[in-house]
Amino acid sequence: MAASGYPVGLDVDGPAAQNRLSVLLRLIFAIPHVIVLYILLLVAEIVVFISWWVILFTGKLPAGMANFVANVLQWGARVGGYYALLTDKYPPFAMGEDSSYPVRLSITPQLEGRNRLTVFFRILMVIPQAIVLYIVTLVAEILVFISWIVALFTGTVPAGMHNFIAGWLRWELRVNAYMLLLTDQYPPFSLN
């Protein structure tokens, strides 16, 4: 379980020097990951749809389904961190946890004792999070753009911007994990 007590946690190393050429070409470098992740996310959506039915009928989430979705989310966290300039280290083409990578997502899926009612109404329950997170995402996107310009000239992302972007990614991943049925615990409205 993550340090905050929530079953989804994101640890991000502090700001470090970044290669200016890598910063300039970051969007192009991320394309292979985006293509693979797109396909994996399509499969994960099918797995989540099946999981939704399984949880409604059995009250349990099969470990294999949970692990697949969690692994896709962990890969997406690394790519998101790379894309958002939280690290200059190119993410590995791998599913699952990677403790050596500067952006680490830990997930403890809730397999047993699922609340069927909250699973049934999950899409409605996530609406308040989606509204607030939409606004936070707009701010984060502006900061990522500003960070990109700053990193082009200085070779690093300022600590304040880095921390806000890391917090935004943390929040987004918690909401995604909740929406993808990995936990019944409602995500906190927090960057921490």
Image: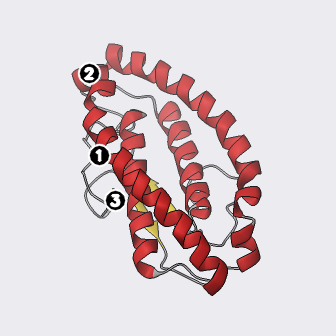
Label 3, label 1: how many angstroms apart (C-alpha)? 23 Å
Q: Could you tell me if residue 148 is visible in this image?
A: yes
User: Image point 32% across, 61% down: which residue?
Assistant: 191
In the image, residue 112 sits, relative to residue 23, either above or below, namely above
Q: Amino acid at mark 3?
A: Ala
In the image, residue 97 sits, relative to residue 70, either above or below, namely below
Q: Residue 101, image x and y in percent?
A: 59, 68
- Could you say whether the residue bearing mark 3 is in a helix, strand or loop? loop
Dividing the picture into quarters, in which one does residue 4 lie?
bottom left
Q: Amino acid at mark 1?
A: Val
Mark 2 and mark 3 in contact? Answer it, CB < 8 Å. Answer: no
Front residue of 164 and 108: 164
Q: Which mark is residue 2?
A: 3
Label 1, label 2: how many angstroms apart (C-alpha)? 25 Å
Q: Which mark is residue 116?
A: 2
Relative horizontal placement of residue 82, taking residue 1 as reference (left or right)? right
User: Image point 43% across, 49% down: which residue?
Assistant: 173
Tag 3 or tag 2, which sits nearer the N-term? 3
